[in-house]
Amino acid sequence: MLEGSFLRDVDMRRDLMELAVNIANIQNAKNPKRSVKTGYKNIDKAEQKILKRNGNRERKPDVEMIKKLNAAFGGGS
């Protein structure tokens, strides 16, 4: 459930980035394309981190924790 909210946040950041590009073009920035590429790269990294979840910092639930959660919330298995 939290992953969905993080992905929504990433989408919102992507939309805000597009808005910033338009503003930069209007204001005749020196090199808006390079800064946009960097911003998109950072957003894509955050999105892939959420989707893949293979980093050491990300804790994956184990079988015992799933059993405890199921018992606490009345779920089967």
Image (cartoon, helix red, strand yellow):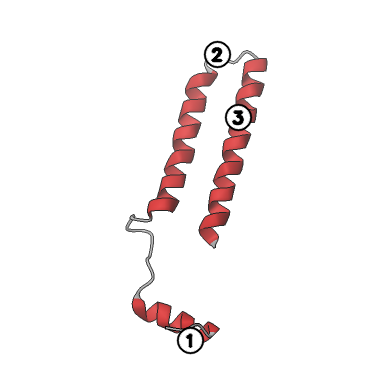
**How far apart are labels 1 and 3 at the CA level?**
45 Å
Residue type pointed to by label 3: Glu
**How far apart are labels 2 and 3 at the CA level?**
17 Å
Q: In the image, what residue occupies the spot 42% across and 42% down?
A: 45
Residue 8 is tagged as: none
Does 12 sit above or below residue 67?
above
Contact? badges 2 and 3 (CB < 8 Å): no
Query: What residue occupies the far front of the structure in this picture?
Result: 76
Residue type pointed to by label 2: Lys
**How far apart are labels 1 and 2 at the CA level?**
59 Å
Q: Quadrant of residue 27?
A: top right
Q: Quadrant of residue 2?
A: bottom right
Under circle 2, the secondary element is loop
Q: In the image, what residue occupies the spot 54% across and 19% down?
A: 32
Q: Which residue is mark 1?
A: 71
* 15 sits left or right of 49 in the view: right
Residue 30 is tagged as: 2
Q: Quadrant of the C terminus?
A: bottom left
Q: In the image, what residue occupies the spot 44% across and 52% down?
A: 50
Q: Which mark lies nearer to you, 1 or 2?
A: 1
Under circle 3, the secondary element is helix
Residue type pointed to by label 1: Ala
Which percent across, then down, holds residue 37?
A: 47, 27
Q: Which residue is mark 3?
A: 18
Crowding near the residue tagged with mark 1, few <14, some 14–19, many ≥20 C-alpha atoms within 10 Å: few
Under circle 1, the secondary element is helix
Contact? badges 1 and 2 (CB < 8 Å): no
